[in-house]
Image (tube, rainbow, N blue to C red):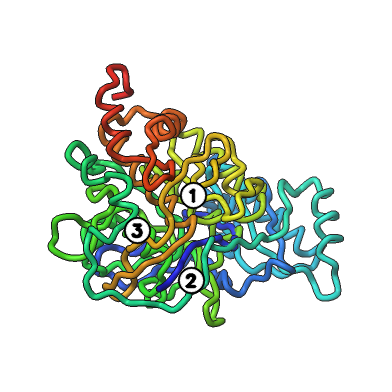
């Protein structure tokens, strides 16, 4: 049986430059704008730096040979004249190598991932850049990992039935579906890729974006994102497989994590890829964002996540198995935190949801069991979609409080309950409609 859960290893970049795949059958992955970028997997969090400069894009005076981006060199796609000039001057002064670059429109920044010159200590370069008035942000490139348990004797089932779905059964999801199945709600899944051709996900994936590379085959082979997608939105009443917590919700898939070549290695993300995904989401209509991943605090990611929360989005995040909440995204106020339900009491305001031995979709059209906080979070994302479909005006705090109040004992364990939450919402006269 396979146990999969993501603790992303992160690197950040902007969504405007991300590759997007038409659905459901397209296999082409467009390049990142007109930029040439290093694959995220080639970046080194022990060495590389994220650098940001101001990138105001007010239309400059139009002169012959100019454009709305000013006289920006073509190598800085999406950068205005001020940002391009500052980056060129910084590169001459510090002699670093640029690995990738992208504009973050929502923050008026242009960011690059840079490699320090040979023989230069990264901490010394970070200190120098932080003191340079041309620099708005300089930070290490951070790594994140999926909250996963390593495989322990994989067992493949050929008779996947709803009755085998522990999370679906224990949370009374079928009863909740009599009143809501998540129609009209878009959920952004920031994760690995997803098997876009899986029969139990057909019609549920609205769009897909690759922030890591241009490898369409790897996108479709990725297991963790496929597992998360199935828990949330697997198709119901199609005479095969399983049923998602919100089977009529739509998914937007953002591949920000990838699998290293080492055997049994968990999926990784970095600041570059996660920032690209979050920046793209800011300009999307996704109402819920599922983050089954985590890692260290990151200034750039915190800025982007803060903007997403200010827009009224619902962000659902898994907390690490050991329960420490001190990094990204779990330390950000306003994020709905989810742990795997268990006999011990949950920390204050943390939801408990099923996360052990969860039957869900697998690449290649299959199904298998998997475990971990990464599986608990999508149960809550699906429930949030059920509630928003009934009451679109609900905010993150109202959803969290409703799910806390309506949690019920199942097998002696207190955890969220879809039917109880939907029933309470329907019986609340002033619920945000």
Q: Which residue is mark 2?
A: 213
Circle nearer the N terminus (3, 2): 2
Residue 3 figure quarter: bottom left
Q: Secondary structure at mark 3?
A: helix
236 vs 37, left or right, is left
Label 3: few (<14), some (14–19) or many (≥20) C-alpha neighbours in 10 Å = many
Q: Nearer the viewer, mark 1 or mark 3?
A: 1
Q: Does 21 appear above or below 321?
A: below
Question: How far across and how far down the image is residue 301, in percent?
Answer: 60, 49
Question: How far across and how far down the image is residue 283, in percent?
Answer: 43, 44
Number of marks in the rendered image:
3
State which quarter of the image contains the N terminus: bottom left
Q: Nearer the viewer, mark 3 or mark 2?
A: 3
Q: Nearer the viewer, mark 1 or mark 2?
A: 1
Question: How far across and how far down the image is residue 366, in percent?
Answer: 28, 73
Q: Which residue is mark 1?
A: 342
Q: Does 263 appear above or below 94?
A: below
Q: Which residue is mark 3?
A: 229
Residues marked 1 and 3 touching at CB (< 8 Å)? no
Q: Secondary structure at mark 2?
A: loop
Q: CA distance from mark 1 to mark 2?
A: 38 Å
């Amino acid at each position: 049986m396979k146990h999969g859960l993501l603790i992303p290893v992160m690197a950040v970049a902007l969504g405007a430059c991300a590759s997007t795949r038409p659905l459901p059958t397209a296999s082409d992955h467009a390049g990142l704008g007109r930029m040439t970028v290093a694959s995220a997997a080639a970046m080194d969090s022990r060495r590389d730096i994220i650098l940001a400069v101001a990138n105001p894009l007010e239309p400059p005076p139009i002169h012959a040979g100019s454009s709305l981006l000013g006289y920006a060199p073509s190598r800085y796609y999406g950068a205005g004249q001020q940002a391009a000039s500052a980056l060129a001057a910084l590169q001459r002064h510090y002699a670093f190598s640029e690995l990738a670059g992208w504009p973050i429109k929502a923050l008026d920044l242009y960011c690059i991932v840079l490699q320090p010159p040979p023989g230069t200590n990264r901490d010394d370069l970070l200190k120098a850049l932080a003191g340079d008035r041309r620099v708005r942000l300089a930070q290490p490139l951070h790594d994140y990992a999926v909250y996963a348990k390593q495989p322990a004797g994989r067992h493949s089932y050929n008779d996947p039935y709803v009755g085998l779905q522990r999370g679906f059964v224990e949370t009374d999801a079928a009863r909740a579906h009599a009143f809501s199945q998540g129609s009209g709600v878009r959920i952004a899944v920031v994760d690995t890729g997803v098997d876009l051709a899986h029969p139990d996900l057909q019609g549920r994936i609205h769009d897909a974006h690759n922030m890591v590379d241009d490898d369409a085959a790897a996108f479709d082979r990725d297991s963790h994102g496929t597992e998360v997608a199935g828990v949330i939105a697997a198709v119901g009443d199609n005479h095969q497989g399983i049923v998602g917590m919100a089977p009529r919700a739509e998914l937007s898939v953002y591949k920000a994590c990838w699998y290293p070549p080492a055997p049994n290695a968990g999926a990784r993300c970095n600041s570059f890829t996660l920032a690209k995904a979050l920046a793209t989401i800011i300009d999307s209509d996704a109402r819920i964002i599922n983050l089954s991943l985590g890692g260290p605090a990151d200034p750039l990611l915190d800025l982007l996540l803060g903007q997403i929360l200010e827009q009224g989005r619902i962000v659902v995040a898994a907390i690490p198995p050991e329960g420490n909440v001190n990094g990204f995204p779990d330390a950000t106020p306003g994020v709905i935190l989810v742990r795997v339900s268990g006999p011990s009491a949950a920390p204050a305001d943390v939801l408990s949801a099923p996360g052990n031995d969860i039957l869900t979709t697998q690449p290649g059209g299959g199904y298998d069991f998997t475990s971990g906080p990464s599986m608990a979070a999508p149960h809550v994302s699906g429930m949030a979609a059920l509630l928003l479909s009934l009451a679109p005006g609900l905010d993150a705090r109202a959803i969290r409080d409703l799910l806390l109040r309506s949690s019920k004992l199942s097998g002696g364990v207190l955890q969220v309950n879809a039917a109880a939450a939907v029933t309470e919402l329907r019986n609340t006269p002033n619920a945000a409609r």
